[in-house]
Image: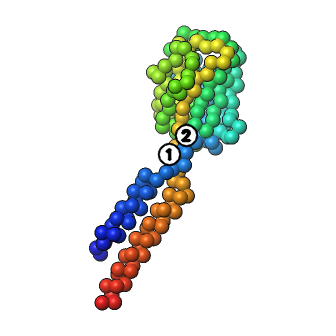
Amino acid sequence: MRLSKRQGRLIALTVAATLTGASAQASLIGDQVHGVYLFPDIASIYNDLGTPTVGASNPTFPDINGAGTFDINITATQIVFDFTAVGASFPAAFDGVRFTDLTTPFTSASFNPANDTPGVNAADLWIAGGDIYLNLNNATFGPGDVLTIDVPGGGGGVPEPATWALMLTGFGLAGAAVRRRRGAAIAI
């Protein structure tokens, strides 16, 4: 069976809309995120923070190091460290946190440009095995300091209903055109 140029274009447009169509904002909402505070190295758990489900109210890991120095809030697309006291990290190979999204592993994370925590830089943030690590080893902080990690959600976006509708309409029209052409060939 051979397709006309019009049918080929219609199928190509349908495929392009499917591959490049807008997808829903990837979000951590509904994901279970497990947090641990690691000290004095990456293999030593100092404090297990638990596994809340991210929701509209933003789960909080309060007072994660037991010293009343900072809380962590998780939103749909960010992990926000809110420092509540003056402090500095302890000298160690690793003094920080690891986050594991139990629903969909993390694939990317970056520092928000509005960060104002001295001593923390891009080299202190990385992803390994789907987990986010943040080493606060050289950090100094005070009340009101904020450190934000932008996380575009746990996984890839899901196509929006409009994208699915466009795709199904395109395939339907392509199928109808093929059937119509096939019916015309039989009638001759």
Give the left or right position of residue 183, taking residue 98 as reference: left
Residue 98 seen in the current view = no
Q: Quadrant of the N terminus?
A: bottom left
| 89 and 12: which is toward the camera | 12
- Residues packed near mark 1 inside 10 Å, few (<14), some (14 to 19) or many (20 plus): some
| 131 and 181: which is toward the camera | 181
Type of the residue with mark 1: Gly
Q: Position of residue 170 (x, y in %)?
A: 44, 66
Q: Position of residue 101 (x, y in %)?
A: 57, 37
Q: Residue at x 35, y 70 (%)?
A: 7
User: Which residue has dot 1 on it?
Assistant: 156
Q: Residue furthest front?
A: 6
Q: Residue at x 33, y 87 (%)?
A: 186
Type of the residue with mark 2: Gly
Instruction: Assign a secondary structure to mark 1.
Output: loop
Q: Residue furthest left?
A: 2
Q: Residue at x 44, y 57 (%)?
A: 18
When the figure is inspected, residue 2 is found, relative to residue 124, above or below; the finding is below
User: Which residue has dot 2 on it?
Assistant: 153
Q: Residue furthest bottom?
A: 188
Quarter assignment of residue 139 = top right
When the figure is inspected, residue 151 is found, relative to residue 187, above or below; the finding is above
Give the left or right position of residue 65, taking residue 183 as reference: right
Q: Position of residue 43 (x, y in %)?
A: 53, 22
Would you say the residues marked 1 and 2 are in contact, meaning their CB atoms lie under 8 Å apart? no
Q: Position of residue 56 (x, y in %)?
A: 68, 40
When the figure is inspected, residue 181 is found, relative to residue 38, above or below; the finding is below
